[in-house]
Image (cartoon, rainbow, N blue to C red):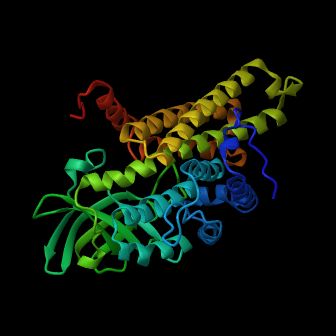
Amino acid sequence: MTFEPLASDFYSYESLLTEREKQAIAELRAWLEADVKPIVGDYWERAEFPMQVVKPLAEHGVLSYGWDETKPFENSAVFRGFVAMELARVDASVATFVGVQNGLATGSISVCGSKEQREEWIPKLASGEVLGAFGLTEPLSGSDSAQGLRTTAKRDGDSWTLNGAKRWIGNATFSDITIIWAKDVDDNQVKGFIVPTSTPGYTATKIQGKISLRAVQNADITLEDVVVSESLRLQNANSFRDTASVLRLTRAEVAWAAVGTAIGAYEAAVKYAGERVQFGKTIGSHQLVQDLLVKSLGNITASLGMVVRVSEMLDRGEQRDEHSALAKAYTTARMRETVAWAREACGGNGITLEYDVARFFADAEALYSYEGTREMNTLIVGRKITGSAAFV
């Protein structure tokens, strides 16, 4: 299959990919365009997730990028970023599903699990045989999770009892396991647990009435005397620092997804501008519409440069919290501007699902907030700049 560069990649960042990586992107893009793009608007409107995409995602290797236990990982962080961008360019909900399954759930086991846990769970998650979720955020604890976690874990011999609640947990209505982060009542440190969702006392209830990422199945989780064995405790998760090490790896890919969401809206607006006729000519030939499109492309190009560089730093082992935090804060802010300009370019039709822009416009609001709000990521960078923490 021939790789065709995106017109929206104005400075040709995709040229940094190897030929093998370009081929993988081309195959993924063809499937997304043929089988996913035509259905996502309907699923978004019905607030349902298209479960039929899980198997093809696994077959394309998307659910195993980064965590292969059988051979050294061959794909770069830059390539993984382009995969996240490609998914979000078609649908941010599908990109979010992958981010939870592959980044947060599988990533937690890869980073914080024992060798035995990695060997048991990662192949099942990579194949889609087991679906995962990541339970950190709580009803009363979001940005302050490092200190304000209220879910508790109490050890009794070879088992642990978990009590508490989680909120906004993606994939949680259908996950087979959820990574639950809880505070050990004995040492007051945060620990992670692989919790099968069939465990007595575990309940997940779908959150209704969302206006963003409607296809993502977010849930409220309650944990009432949920008992799990010591073998299900992530053996290398001993404090919130270990939790943060997972988030550090996934935050940059959220920035990539933000770029993809901006591109999806921009491409829809460009298409509309070339078809919609007003005053005897296409609106794309009007100066004001061109201005909106050029500003959008500028945001996309600047954001792409940032995320490519951050991923290059990750490949070299140089990326730190402040680097991924700046990328997430900046790209989501530029995404928010871009989807608004794209909607504006489409006029009244920009608020309907028929023209795609409305879906990207709404979904951008969730990406702007999850995996660290702009404000929290700003404070992480601000601490590095000034040497002073201003979190409280």
- The image shows residue 60 at horizontal and vertical percentages of 65, 66
**Residue 318 horizontal side relative to residue 308, left or right:** left
Q: Name the one closer to the observer, 21 or 93.
A: 21
Quadrant assignment for the C terminus: top left
Rendered residue at 38%/66% (across/down): 109
Q: Is residue 244 above or below residue 220?
A: above
Nearer-the-camera pick, 210 or 152: 152
Picture residue at 33% right of the left edge, 63% below the top: 112
Q: Quadrant of residue 20 in the image?
A: bottom right
Q: Is residue 197 above or below residue 96?
A: below
Vertical placement of residue 69 versus 363, above or below: below
* Residue 9 percent coordinates (x, y): 69, 37
Q: Residue furthest right?
A: 280
**Is 387 displayed left or right of 355 in the figure?**
left
Q: Position of residue 143 (x, y in %)?
A: 30, 44
Q: Is residue 229 visible?
A: no
- The answer to which quarter of the image holds residue 293 is top right
Q: Is any atom of residue 92 visible in this view?
A: yes
Instruction: Quarter of the image for the N terminus: give it.
Output: bottom right
Residues 377 and 365: in front is 377
- In the depicted structure, whether residue 170 falls above or below residue 7: below
